[in-house]
């Protein structure tokens, strides 16, 4: 490899790679922003509905300067992480039980499938009735949202472990526990990670919903307030922040996933 | 000394008999091939000996290994764990034998790839790794279930020679399932021919080295005839080709 990159052909390939690595994904947003800014300033867009990107930027910057924005971001991130930890953790745990034990599967699977069929938002009124509009109902909603993707993927991953690999464990005289820990769990790891990634995305989604219902802080609260006081700059600013945070957390988990699954023989690696 | 003894082994799948009263003895240091047409139950027999199929009638006895392990298995596919390196794969289920890894890797020709992942290995290399994993615990019998049928002819020949080398080096007893007569003739000291299901032992042929090409060819024709594939072979007249 080192030799190849020293050769002229290698250099050519290297420069091609840097060209390919240009953040092409940014092109569309940048061009879009420029056009938008121009249209807003030229008066083609009604400012009480679509403010210029620069106005949105100043609004966000002001909130940042007063430190108020950090309060909201902190509250939202805390809810996402806590809810995801509870929901994803339980999903992984129950998924392991159902995926590994026929008895637990027969006991739980039908019920969980039925609960899964309830559209998740349907829980909102019940949660409010039970837990009020405080933190508990919000966290519960986020936990429900992230539970199912993690659970479903964990079960599918464990069920999908090749019998051929398990047989190797048997002829190599591994105990049941050994087969579980050293064959089933690593073999199902790609599915576990897919589940966690989808679960985290769900957690962001349900956090916004929970905060839209009733909250005194958080990005969802900013959205709700932006609507009430007719501040489109606040609304759009919050949406941009949500997009950035969601994308950021997904990129982080994706990076962890690629690191943990380097052994996979796929096109990506 | 018999390392593996099978007496009156019968097996059926949902009432359909697959194996019928099979008797077989494999002696220490011997390579025995189980030869038969596809679907004749030879792999089933091997799985029973490997302990992967406890549902059978009859008696299967494997001598205790010096170190507890009595059988090692090489499957048709390498069945390596993709998340483990070659070294970790060889050590899988062989925790107590760390100090032997280098030697076995050298013996199967994998010394230079111990840190590679399975996705970086060719088919032949992967099968070498599987052989090393099966042998590291020094089993009394190495069971091979059509171990080379997915490989090209050149690689297959290399691995035949590898098995013979390993037998010379470690004195390993081997039971090899195959549907390739040439493979059986090349590898084994004895060939056990199984017929169509429900299969019985049709014939046992002692091969051994020192046979002429003609005798090999004749043996091949005889076995094919036994299995009902070809016309009766012409009797050999020694000396006819001599001039």
Image (tube, rainbow, N blue to C red):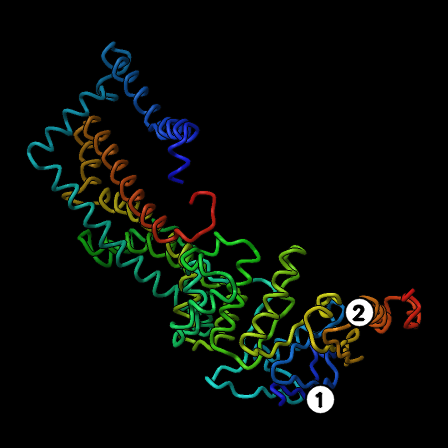
Residue A79: percent from left, percent from top? 21, 50
Q: Which mark is residue B8?
A: 1
Q: Percent from the top left, x then y, of residue A211?
A: 22, 44
Quadrant location, the C terminus of chain B: bottom right
Relative side of A33 to B161, left or right: left
**Dot 2 lies on which element?**
loop
Q: Residue furthest top?
A: A42
Q: Check if mark 1 and mark 2 are on a common chain.
A: yes
The label on residue A44 is none
Q: On the image, which quarter does residue A204 sit in?
A: top left
Residue A113 appears in view = no
Q: Nearer the viewer, residue B108 or A27?
A: B108
Which residue is located at x 30 percent, y 22 percent? A30
Which residue sits furthest left? A66
- Residue B217: which quarter of the image? bottom right
The residue to which callout 2 is attached is B212
The part of the image, by quadrant, that contains residue B239 is bottom right
**Residue A253 x, y percent position in the rendering:** 31, 48
Q: Residues within 10 Å of mark 1 (few under 14, many from 20)?
A: some
Identify the residue at horizontal 64%, vertical 88% (top origin): B5
Along the viewing direction, whichever of B215 and A101 lies nearer the viewer:
B215
Whether residue B166 is visible, yes or no, is yes
- Identify the chain of the residue marked 1, using the numbered disc in the image: B
Task: Assess whether mark 2 and mark 1 are in contact (beta carbons under 8 angstroms).
Answer: no
Where residue B39 sits: x, y (%)? 73, 69
Horizontally, residue A264 falls left or right of residue B200, namely left
Rounded to the nearest whole Å, what is the CA distance between mark 1 and mark 2? 35 Å
The quadrant of the image that shows the N terminus of chain B is bottom right
**Compared to B102, does A199 lie above or below?**
above
Chain under callout 2:
B
Residue A216 versus residue B169 in the image, above or below: above
Q: Secondary structure at mark 1?
A: strand
């Amino acid at each position: 490899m080192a030799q190849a990159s020293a050769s002229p052909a290698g250099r050519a390939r290297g420069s091609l790679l840097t060209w390919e690595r240009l953040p092409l994904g940014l092109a569309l947003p940048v061009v879009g922003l420029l056009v938008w800014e121009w249209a807003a300033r030229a008066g083609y867009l009604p400012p009480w509905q679509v403010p210029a990107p620069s106005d949105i930027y100043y609004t966000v910057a002001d909130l940042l300067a007063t430190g108020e924005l950090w309060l909201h971001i902190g509250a939202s991130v805390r809810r996402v992480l806590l809810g995801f930890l509870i929901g994803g953790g339980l999903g992984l745990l129950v998924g392991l039980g159902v995926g590994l034990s026929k008895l637990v599967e027969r006991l739980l699977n039908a019920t969980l499938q039925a609960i899964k069929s309830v559209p998740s938002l349907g829980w909102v009124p019940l949660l409010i009735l039970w837990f009020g509009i405080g933190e508990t109902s919000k966290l519960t909603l986020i936990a429900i949202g992230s539970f199912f993707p993690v659970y479903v993927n964990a079960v599918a991953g464990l069920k999908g472990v090749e019998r051929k690999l398990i047989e190797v464990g048997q002829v190599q005289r591994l105990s049941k526990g050994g087969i579980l820990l050293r064959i089933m769990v690593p073999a199902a790891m790609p599915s576990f990670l897919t589940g966690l990634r989808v679960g985290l995305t769900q957690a962001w989604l349900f956090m916004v919903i929970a905060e839209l219902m009733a909250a005194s802080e958080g990005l969802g609260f900013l959205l709700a307030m932006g609507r009430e006081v007719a501040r489109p700059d606040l609304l759009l600013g919050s949406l941009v922040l949500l997009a950035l945070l969601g994308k950021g957390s997904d990129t982080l988990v994706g990076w962890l996933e690629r690191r943990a699954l380097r052994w996979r023989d796929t096109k990506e690696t | 000394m018999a390392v593996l003894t099978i007496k009156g082994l019968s097996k059926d799948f949902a009432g359909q008999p697959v194996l019928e009263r099979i008797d077989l003895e494999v002696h220490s240091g011997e390579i025995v091939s189980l030869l038969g047409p596809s679907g004749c139950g030879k792999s089933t027999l091997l799985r029973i000996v490997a302990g992967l199929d406890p549902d059978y009638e009859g008696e299967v006895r494997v001598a205790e290994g010096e170190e507890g392990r009595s059988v090692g298995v090489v499957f048709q596919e390498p069945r390596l764990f993709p998340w483990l390196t070659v070294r970790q794969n060889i050590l899988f289920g062989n925790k107590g034998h760390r100090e032997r890894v280098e030697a076995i890797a050298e013996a199967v020709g994998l010394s230079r790839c111990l840190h590679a992942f399975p996705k970086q290995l060719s088919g032949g290399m992967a099968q070498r790794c599987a052989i090393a994993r099966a042998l590291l615990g020094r089993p009394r019998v190495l069971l091979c279930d059509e171990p080379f049928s997915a490989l090209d002819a050149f690689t297959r020949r290399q691995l035949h020679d590898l098995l013979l080398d390993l037998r010379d080096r470690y004195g390993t007893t081997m039971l090899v399932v195959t549907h390739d007569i040439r493979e059986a003739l090349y590898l084994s000291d004895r060939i056990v021919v199984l017929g169509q299901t429900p299969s019985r032992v049709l014939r046992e042929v002692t091969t051994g080295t020192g046979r002429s090409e003609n005798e090999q060819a004749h043996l091949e024709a005889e076995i094919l005839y036994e299995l009902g594939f070809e016309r009766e072979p012409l009797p050999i007249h020694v000396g006819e080709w001599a001039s």
